[in-house]
Image: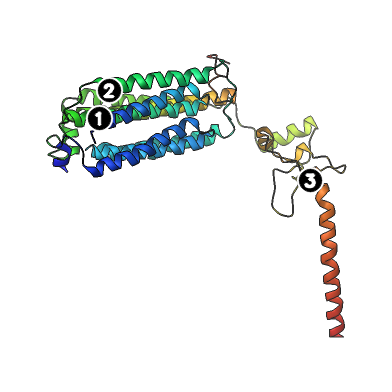
Amino acid sequence: MTAQLAAYTTSTGEAFQFWVLGTIAVIGALCTVFMKKAVHSALCLAGTMIVLAVFYLANGAYFLGIVQIVVYTGAIMMLFLFVVMLVGVTAADSLKETIKGQRWLALLCGLGFGTLLIGGIGNASLKEFNGLGRANANGNVEGLATLIFTKYVFAFELTGALLITATVGAMVLTHRERTERAKTQRELAEQRVREGKHVPPLPAPGVYARHNAVDIAGLLPDGTPSELTVSKTLRDRGQVRDVSTEALSDLKALEQRAEDRLERSNSGGSNSGEASK
Amino acid sequence: MNPVNYLYLAALLFTIGATGVLIRRNAIVVFMCVELMLNACNLAFVAFARMHGNLDGQIIAFFTMVVAAAEVVVGLAIIVSVFRARHSASVDDASLMKL
């Protein structure tokens, strides 16, 4: 392995790995940008990060490869998924451009920037690849530890301060202090009676025989759906299903089928009744 | 294969991430694209460490990861609190510092 890393060019195996996994990484990155739903973007990004972890391992950064999997795909991406669950599900990405032609300009900028960057790397004289054979001789983790606790010890301690600050910041930003006492059940009941709008409990949602459907509004006697029967959360999200028209058209077919079924069971029942007699 | 190819891949991923930041309107996806850019930088650092034969590049990549973790925590907290205030995670809607 060390001899391999010290080599000027990589082994065939690593080249193969690079081309296969590199393709996956680029596809994952493109999917992150172009997927419509935030959840899909997050999953594609997690895939790209795992591929990058494999590349770190291939480059002799064993500690970083593992940290990448544990910290990035394990912690950060899962945090992203949690926030997507909190926020992103209802927040649809608006496809309307606020600045005219911004998307094409952005693509053009990206293309130009990429060309410049890749051209710059192409022009740089990166002929010498020393490999990490000597640096990793005593083990990668030991080498990193030596550097962190000697040359970079000040930066390392600053990192600790940064992490503490970030933790406190996140708690301050997301914590909400209750400014008034929560109302007890009795107080809520008294308030309801005082207002006199809905003294009894709210009506139950319409329920289909096929499944327990809380998102289907119950129908009033005249066939119109009642808003009151569906939970406020579902109403706010716009996830109420209106089946009033569906139900009426299905009713006839349902009755027909029920009649057929009943006739057959009636005749069967009379037959068995006669046999028992 | 020349190991310089890792640098080309890092450049490509960085470019894709930057384009994503410019294109997308959802704050969470914009944030993910920033993470992609940070990861591309880390790949470049690791490749440079291999090129120069010392571990300094890996140390810098390690610190980048720590800073990125802190950044994600605070950034997502900001997104959640902005969402609470405006009921939207779109970067277009958050045009004012206050409501």
Residue contact between numbered discs 2 and 1, judged by CB atoms under 8 Å:
yes
- Identify the image quadrant of residue A65: top left
Q: Kindly identify which residue carries mark 2.
A: A121
> Of discs 3 and 2, which sits in the foreground?
2
**Apparent side of residue A212 relative to residue A13 in the rendered image (left or right):** right
Determine whether A104 is above or below A4 in the image: above
Q: Are the residues under marks 3 and 1 on the same chain?
A: no
Residue B4: assigned label? 1
Residue drawn at x 20%, y 27% is: B56
Residue type beneath disc 3: Glu
Mark 3 closeness class: few <14, some 14–19, many ≥20 residues within 10 Å = few
Q: Nearer the viewer, residue A219 or A260?
A: A260
Question: Which residue shows up at 45% across the image and 27% down it?
Answer: B31
> Residue drawn at (79%, 39%), measured in percent from left and top?
A226
Q: Where B93 sits versus A221, above or below?
A: above
Q: Chain of mark 3?
A: A
Mark 2 falls on what kind of element?
A: helix
* Visible residue check, residue B56: yes
Q: Give the percent coordinates (x, y) of residue A181.
A: 60, 29
Kindly report the distance in space between the C-alpha atoms of the residues bearing marks 3 and 2: 63 Å
Circles 2 and 1 on the same subunit: no
Residue matched to label 3 = A246
Dot 2, crowdedness within 10 Å: few (<14), some or many (≥20)? some
Q: Can see residue B70?
A: no
Q: Considering the image in quadrants, where does the N terminus of chain B appear?
A: top left
Kind of residue at badge 2: Ile
Q: Is residue A186 left or right of residue B12?
A: right
**Going by the image, does B79 lie left or right of A69?**
right
Output the chain of dot 1: B
